[in-house]
Image (spheres, grey):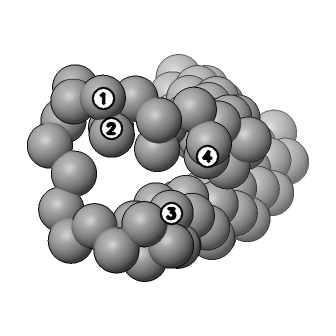
């Protein structure tokens, strides 16, 4: 039978799973914004493909820096949320 402590730990896991889901959705949205920024940059200049580490690549990166930073923040928040969920699950198994 599950005791009160385990129920509290399960609720903590559920809450953290919901937070992970929220951050995952945000990261995906920020990634799509970044991809859209890249596509818009290339369309504006009528460029089909940009080679990595080329001068065009550097300009594209520079012009879409805000979207990239937003994506990085969202990615890091998702990573931290997943780590906290993993810790909560370990805590449950240890109890």
Vertical arrangement, residue 64 with respect to residue 92, above or below: below
Which mark lies nearer to you, 1 or 2?
1
- Per the model, the C-alpha gap separating discs 3 and 4 is 8 Å
SS at mark 2 in the image: helix
Question: Which is in the foreground here, disc 3 or disc 4?
Answer: 3
Q: Are marks 3 and 4 in contact (CB under 8 Å)?
A: yes
- Res 46 → quadrant: bottom left
Q: Is residue 67 visible?
A: yes
Whole-angstrom CA distance, mark 1 to mark 2, is 5 Å
User: Which secondary structure, mark 4?
Assistant: loop
Which residue is denoted by mark 3 in the rendering? Answer: 41
Residue visible at 43% across and 77% down? 43
10 Å neighbourhood of mark 2: few (<14), some, or many (≥20)? some
Image quadrant holding the N terminus, namely: bottom right
Quarter of image, res 25:
bottom right
Question: Mark 1: few, some, or many residues within 10 Å (few <14, many ≥20)?
Answer: few
Residue under the image location 14 percent in, 43 percent down = 51
Q: Gap between marks 2 and 4, in whole Å?
A: 11 Å
Query: Which numbered disc flags the more N-terminal residue, 3 or 2?
Result: 3
Residue 55 is marked as 1
């Amino acid at each position: 039978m599950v005791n009160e402590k385990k129920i509290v730990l399960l609720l903590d896991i559920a809450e953290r799973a919901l937070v992970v889901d929220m951050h995952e959705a945000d990261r995906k949205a920020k990634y799509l914004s970044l991809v859209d920024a890249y596509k818009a940059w290339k369309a504006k200049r009528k460029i089909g493909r940009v080679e990595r580490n080329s001068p065009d690549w550097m300009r594209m990166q520079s012009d879409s820096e805000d979207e990239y930073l937003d994506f990085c923040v969202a990615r890091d928040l998702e990573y931290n949320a997943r780590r906290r969920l993993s810790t909560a699950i370990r805590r449950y198994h240890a109890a």
